[in-house]
């Protein structure tokens, strides 16, 4: 609370002390026992301080609160940050004392969110304090509103980590809020939408948040909800562009996303999404080399080189799902590269975690042991059933071996 006289002078009320500092925010810190401090306690108050004290005496806390708030806003850009933080902290506590926190909290949060790049750390700290007070005093009808503003601020100010911690734990935190706070459907949609917006530039997380958000909507919602439409198109484009998202069939299967197939403006976007979700480099090449496809790529800023690389890797996955022994020639033909480059592409697929495989350079053969699943339909369920059955039989065989190796009872 550096810079606030009433911190060290008990003769001043909190209201008078805050009003005095707001009148003279550039005054140096006065310590208890100093001659200057004693003089400050008995010196004539400013007109602003006198007016605040009078309002407090008459019990007009609403007007008093408004005056203090306005003065705090005026000083936000120029006053010492530490002192300003202390002043706001005391102001918040006065609001609690006057039972004005509930009606004031959203306007206060809006003010702090208004310029996210100006003194971002201070604004973040004060918003977190407001959120904590709302929780502390059980203002359950206000906590969602404050959380929404906190999310928007953190995203705009690039303070997500400072507010919500490591990115890996944020989805779990959101799911916990949804359950514990018993949020209704519109609130859940708003929350996931905000977190999608906040993470839409993160190529590793954008798919997870898009999936959470878009799964909440039916196909019919797309035509009536402009915000949903914008986010949906953004999510599909970012998924296609992402160098780390290779499995996107679940997104392509969502009702709202599938509705794009019948959309005059975005039918080609859905077609490209399906190619990346399930198809191969052959279909991709045909799409991109067409006049309409080339125009589509140019319109949406899609890079052919990056997209080609991704589709070649996905095509190797599809080949590995069908056959466990792949010749270099078959791979080269499928992804349209020279046979001499096949090993490089197979190593890329292994390095990206898309397949597990070994290469025999003499036989020019790739032996695939495992692949990711690009889609999960009836065929994939069948393959999973076979794998689990094989695993079960292996365990049974191992148990039989162990049983057979045991000595007879009594020996």
Image (cartoon, helix red, strand yellow):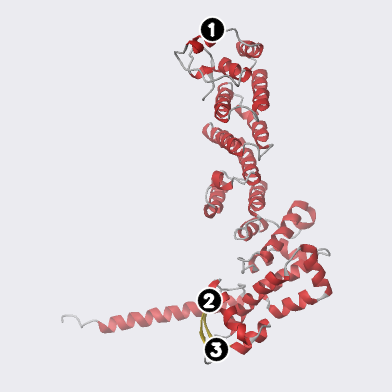
Determine which residue is flagged by label 1: 42
Is disc 2 in contact with disc 1, using a CB cutoff of under 8 Å? Answer: no
Q: Secondary structure at mark 3?
A: strand
Determine which residue is flagged by label 3: 365
Crowding at label 2, few (<14), some or many (≥20) Cα neighbours within 10 Å?
Answer: few
Q: CA distance from mark 2 to mark 1?
A: 83 Å
Q: CA distance from mark 3 to mark 1?
A: 93 Å
**Against 367, is 186 above or below?**
above
Q: Residue furthest bottom?
A: 363
**Against 88, is 46 above or below?**
above
Picture quarter containing residue 336?
bottom right
- Give percent across and percent down for residue 215: 66, 59
In the image, which is nearer the foreground, mark 3 or mark 1?
Answer: 1
Q: Secondary structure at mark 1?
A: helix
Q: Nearer the viewer, residue 30 or 331?
A: 30
- Give percent across and percent down for residue 296: 80, 67
Q: Is residue 154 visible?
A: yes
In the image, which is nearer the foreground, mark 2 or mark 1?
Answer: 1
Determine which residue is flagged by label 2: 384
- Give percent across and percent down for residue 324: 54, 85
Sequence order check, earlier mark of 3 and 1: 1
């Amino acid at each position: 609370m550096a810079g606030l006289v009433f911190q060290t002078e008990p003769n001043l009320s909190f209201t008078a002390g805050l009003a005095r500092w707001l009148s003279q925010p550039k005054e140096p810190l006065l310590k208890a026992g100093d001659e200057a401090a004693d003089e400050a306690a008995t010196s004539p108050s400013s007109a602003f301080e006198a007016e605040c004290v009078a309002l407090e005496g008459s019990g007009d806390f609403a007007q008093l609160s408004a005056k203090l708030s306005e003065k705090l806003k005026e000083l936000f850009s120029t006053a010492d940050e530490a002192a300003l933080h202390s002043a706001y902290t005391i102001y918040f506590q006065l609001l609690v004392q006057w039972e004005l926190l509930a009606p004031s909290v959203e306007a206060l949060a809006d003010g702090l969110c208004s310029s996210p790049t100006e003194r971002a750390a201070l604004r973040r700290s004060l918003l977190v304090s407001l959120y904590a007070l709302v929780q502390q005093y059980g203002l359950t009808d206000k906590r969602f509103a404050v959380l929404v503003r906190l999310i928007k601020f953190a995203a705009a100010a690039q303070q997500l980590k400072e507010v919500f911690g490591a990115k890996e734990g944020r989805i779990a935190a959101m799911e916990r809020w949804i359950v514990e706070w018993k949020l209704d459907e519109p609130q859940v949609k708003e929350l996931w939408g905000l977190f999608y917006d906040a993470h839409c530039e993160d190529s590793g997380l954008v798919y997870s948040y898009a999936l959470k958000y878009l799964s909440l909507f039916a196909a019919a919602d797309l035509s009536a909800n402009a915000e949903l439409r914008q986010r949906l198109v953004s999510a599909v484009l970012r998924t296609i562009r992402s160098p780390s998202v290779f499995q996107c069939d679940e997104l392509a299967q969502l009702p709202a996303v599938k509705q794009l197939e019948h959309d005059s403006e975005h039918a080609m976007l859905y077609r490209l999404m399906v190619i990346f979700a399930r198809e191969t480099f052959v279909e991709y090449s045909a799409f991109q080399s067409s006049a309409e496809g080339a125009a589509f790529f140019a319109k949406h800023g899609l890079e052919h080189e990056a997209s080609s690389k991704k589709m070649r890797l996905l095509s190797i996955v599809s080949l590995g799902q069908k056959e466990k022994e792949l010749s270099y020639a078959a791979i080269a033909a499928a992804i349209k590269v020279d046979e001499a480059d096949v090993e490089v592409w197979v190593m890329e697929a292994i390095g990206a975690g898309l397949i597990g495989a070994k290469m025999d350079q003499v036989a020019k053969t790739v032996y695939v042991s495992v692949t990711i699943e690009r889609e999960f339909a009836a065929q994939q369920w069948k393959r999973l059933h076979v794998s689990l059955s094989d695993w079960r039989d292996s365990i049974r065989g191992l148990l039989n071996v162990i049983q057979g190796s045991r000595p007879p009872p009594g020996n």
